Image: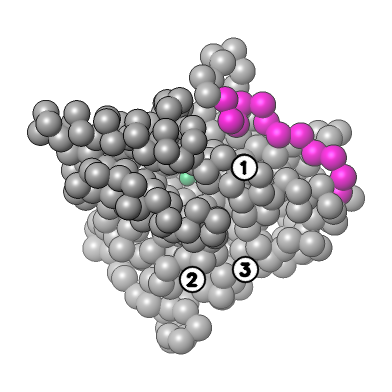
């Protein structure tokens, strides 16, 4: 299959691009498009064949449900069996934006889209291109992140092209995304809402609107307990993974640098390719040949925006061992750490 690649954003507004993408979606085809979090791989959420094609293009297990992207609140009447009061409050506060809510699904949503679940994940993105595409096509767009299963999520069109060229009908290039980490997911089908995936909308921000919420207990475990299953099926897979073996090193600034330097020295002595993920202010502490600047240690937004592109760069360079500083903390740091721990396959070294 030839993949059409076209630009569309605030400065490239050719209506034919949206018309072409809309026709593809309406016919059950697949279009990768930018959102404010990461690029999504879109198909018609109400067409079971489109959902099946999404799973095939990504190489993703079909028990892993998709997020449905909408552009107005009326869509909730079609997609859900009702929205609880707390859901309405969160929508008012954070939509359009990087937050996904789980509701009981309506009969209109096929089980192929929800991975067999009776619930549906819904998000109203704020990205200009995403909104134009949803409105212009009149389609509720089911879209997982537009990466091959197991690879870091795409934060620019080039990443989508690397993973999906020849596997999807069209890729819309809307430049680099703003946030760089997938949306916060919150389950509103329980008495006390549960955060299933941390993201840019933090627990603190959510609790300021609806009061107490819980965190899925499996999210930050160093060693996942095999008897506990995360409620978002996708969170159980080794997502966000670079090809190299990665570990997070925790401890004081000096101890971390010393530990990482001794590890990378040993690798380089053996002729193995290794790399360090460092905050900007720590770059000079490391002696390895490959040291990646992930952004200022106090600039969480920059770290989030750079993370996936950095992991992909490691793959391009054939890095075999990766050591990252820790970014533990609250707020956006919770989301950064969640992705780092998963990329590291839960390997944490105490310096
Ligand atoms: O920011 C985002 O959310 C991006 C952009 C494209 O919108 N999308 C995204 O989709 O990250 P994906 O498929 O890579 O991740 C969706 C996650 C998976 O972990 C999945 O298991 C979970 O959402 N999920 C979807 N529907 C669910 C449901 N009904 N119940 C529980 N978890 C659900
Ligand atoms: Mg994903």
Look at 40% across and 51% down and name the residue there: 282
Q: Which is nearer the N-term, disc 2 or disc 1?
A: 2
Residue 100 vs residue 332, the one in the foreground: 332
In 3D space, how far apart are the residues under numbered discs 2 and 1 (Cα atoms)? Answer: 42 Å
> CB of mark 2 within 8 Å of CB of mark 1?
no
Q: What label sits on residue 22 in the rendered view? A: 2
In the picture, the quarter occupied by the N terminus is: bottom left
Residue 137 vs residue 246, the one in the foreground: 246
Q: What label sits on residue 126 in the rendered view? A: 3
Look at 30% across and 69% down and name the residue there: 4
| Main secondary structure found in the magenta portion | loop
Q: Tell me the SS state at disc 2.
A: helix
Look at 57% across and 25% down and name the residue there: 221
| Residues in magenta, as a range | 210-221
Look at 45% across and 25% down and name the residue there: 350
Q: For mark 3, does the 10 Å Cα neighbourhood hold few (<14), some (14 to 19), or many (20 or more) residues?
A: some
Q: Residue furthest front?
A: 254
């Amino acid at each position: 299959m030839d993949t059409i690649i076209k630009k569309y954003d605030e400065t490239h507004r050719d209506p034919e691009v949206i018309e072409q993408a809309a026709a593809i979606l309406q016919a059950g085809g697949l279009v990768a498009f930018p959102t404010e979090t990461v690029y999504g791989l879109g198909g018609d959420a109400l067409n079971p064949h489109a959902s099946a094609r999404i799973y095939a293009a990504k190489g993703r297990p079909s028990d892993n449900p998709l997020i449905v992207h909408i552009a107005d609140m009326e869509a909730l009447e079609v997609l859900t069996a009702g929205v609880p009061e707390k859901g309405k409050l969160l929508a008012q506060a954070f939509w359009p934006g990087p937050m996904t809510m789980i509701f009981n699904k309506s009969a209109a949503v096929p089980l192929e889209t929800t991975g067999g679940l009776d619930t549906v994940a819904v998000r109203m993105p704020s990205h200009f291109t995403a909104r134009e595409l949803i409105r212009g096509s009149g389609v509720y767009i089911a879209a997982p992140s537009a990466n091959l299963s197991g690879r870091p999520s795409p934060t620019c069109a080039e990443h989508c092209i690397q993973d999906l060229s020849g596997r999807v009908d069209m890729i819309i290039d809307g430049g680099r995304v703003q946030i760089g980490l997938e949306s916060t997911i919150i389950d509103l089908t329980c008495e006390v809402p549960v955060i299933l995936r941390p993201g840019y909308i933090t627990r603190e921000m959510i609790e300021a609107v609806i009061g107490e919420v819980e965190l899925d207990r499996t999210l930050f475990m160093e060693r996942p307990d095999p008897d506990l299953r995360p409620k978002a099926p996708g969170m159980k897979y080794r997502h966000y993974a670079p090809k190299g073996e990665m570990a997070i090193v925790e401890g004081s600034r000096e101890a971390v640098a010393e530990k990482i330097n001794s590890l990378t020295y040993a690798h380089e002595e053996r002729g193995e390719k290794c790399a360090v993920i460092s905050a900007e202010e720590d770059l000079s502490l490391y002696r390895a040949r490959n040291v990646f600047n992930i952004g200022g240690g106090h600039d969480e937004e920059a770290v989030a925006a750079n993370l996936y592109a950095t992991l992909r760069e490691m793959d391009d360079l054939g890095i075999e061992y990766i050591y990252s500083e820790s970014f533990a903390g609250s707020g956006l740091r919770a989301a950064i750490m969640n992705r780092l721990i998963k990329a590291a396959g839960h390997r944490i070294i105490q310096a």
